[in-house]
Image: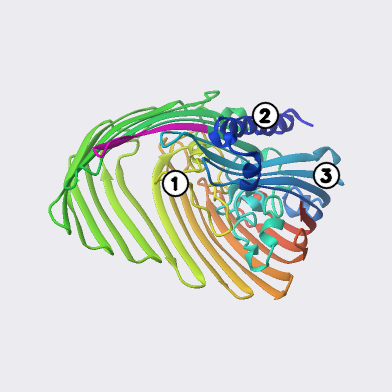
Amino acid sequence: MDPVRRKAARLPLRRVASAGSLVSGLLLGSPCWAQDAGELLQEWRITPRLSAGATYSDNIRLAPADEAEGDLVLQVDPGVSIRKQGGRLNLRLDYTAQGLLYANNSDAGKINNNLLAFGTAELYQDHLFVDAYGSISQVPVTSGGRVDAGNLGLGGGGISGGALGLINWNPGVLPGATDLFNPVGMFGNIALTGNDQTTAANFGISPSWRQNFGDWAKALLRYRYNDSGYGQSEFDSQTQSVTFNLDSGRRFSRLGWSLAYSYQQQDGQQNGDVQEGENNNPGGGNTQQESVFGQLSYKLSNAWKLLAQGGYDNNTGYTDNQNGPYWGLGAAWTPSRFYSLTGLYGLNFNKVAVQWNPSPRTALQISRSYQGVGTSPGVYWNGSLNYKTRYSVWSASYTQEVTTVQQLLGSNLTGLGPDGQPAALNDQGQIIIPGGSLGLTNQSFLRKFFTAGVTYQRGRNALGFNAFSESREFQDANLNNEDSYGAGALWTWRFAPRTASFLGMGWEHDDLGDDQQNDYWVSVIGLARVFSPDLGGLISYRYYQNDADPSDQGFRENRLNARLSMKF
């Protein structure tokens, strides 16, 4: 085994041990252990599982047609799911070890560790909380390299429900299938792409203190440490942040106010110089972000409220950065509980925001803001739409932010949402971790990300559709901007009480600059059967191709897969 592969194999095991330490710290520090042992066991749900099967690929290395090589892959995937909810501890952990043995490439055998975990413990009632989280996944190293289908679309690394890549498989139409057929490793992470893929591991811990000062004010102080590591250590980084929020209490009926301070420091590797056009080359420096923000509101009536906002940004390590103050004055108009319009205008800042909530099933938010200071001054759009009917769920969102791949890996697995509550899961009970086919980089970039999805389930049929668009605009003019967009759909039909078929396809286009483009196509058809509550089987056929420019990156692959899955 070559040194890079040995290093990639060791890293996940170290990270798994780190995850165990974090989770153990949460458990041992929680007052839950003072409860009766019998009550504790009732609150925990631990489900070991095991999947075994075989996959044949006629192009195991995703090489051009004249270099295609077939191989039979034997696969054993032990795993465990742990759930604990209630009391003073909420914990969710899913771990799968994907063991692969290749018939024709015996020296390529490996274990891919896949982890998704987060927990929140209340150590001191109503005051001291600790969040711990971690993830391990497989990600592409270089944009435009040979990408396994599991890394396409929304589900980078195969952790999320998007293990079919662009196709979001929903086994919920088949009773019992959700617990049996863990999506990790079912359709991805098998191709031998050499150094085009590596292991990404992310772990963090975040203690926080909450304090109420009677009815006058409430405060939140949070510290967070995040460690992002890769099989290629030049992309490793550590992030530390401190945030402090002070908000007015119920005593302030007409006058509301809030103050916020945040500081974040990311320490990355600096092991080389960035070459022109090489976005994934190491060499990015450390970054620091510091900001102070304040807001005032005065209620004139039930419909009208005066607003004032202001702050100061002080950042280092960014190419397109402008430090300084900003402020805005304006008003909020809320003629009913279904609709609101907010507008502010001032120095280095203006903003318009609309909210529309005509019913509990519908929520629309759109905002447009101009920032004259910050890590990338300019106009920013953000928005989200959520709509539910009796049989369907519709959603769409658009975000703009200056970030890094390391920050993206860590900021979406904190276990907490923007409102301080546990992070929302998708319809399959999974968290979508941003990934996709775009590679690693140490450079900061402006990320514009759009995603939309529809799920429809009625009776024995389920239909899902996903679409996305992502662009990276690098602050270094010597680097190539990257764009990726695509769509996928999957139909699941339970034609017998214990048997369901699934049929889907997806497409993704990558534009990487310098005349580098990829057009990925993936389609899949298969059958899944639940033999008993604890045993199920699945067979599938998948076709995967890349029509690339230049053509030496193109490939075709046919893949047959059969597996048995059980839980204990």
Disc 3 packing (10 Å; few <14; some 14–19; many ≥20)? some
Secondary structure under tag 2 reads helix
Q: Identify residue type, mark 1.
A: Gln
Secondary structure under tag 1 reads loop
Where residue 5 sits in the image (x, y, percent)? Answer: 73, 33
Q: Residue furthest left?
A: 300
Which one is earlier in the sequence, the residue at label 1 or at label 3? 3
Where residue 532 sits in the image (x, y, percent)? Answer: 78, 63
Nearer to us: label 2 or label 1:
1
Residue occupying the point 72% across, 50% down: 62
**Does residue 391 appear to the left or right of 543 in the view shown?**
left
Which residue is label 1 attached to? 421
Nearer to us: label 1 or label 3:
1
Q: Identify residue type, mark 2.
A: Arg
Q: Which residue lies furthest to the top in this view?
A: 271
Secondary structure under tag 3 reads strand
Examine the rendering and report whether any part of residue 554 can be seen: no
Which residue is label 3 attached to? 101
Where residue 261 sits in the image (x, y, percent)? Answer: 31, 31
Using the numbered discs, state the Cα–Cα distance from disc 3 to disc 2 in whole angstroms.
Answer: 22 Å
Which one is earlier in the sequence, the residue at label 2 or at label 1? 2
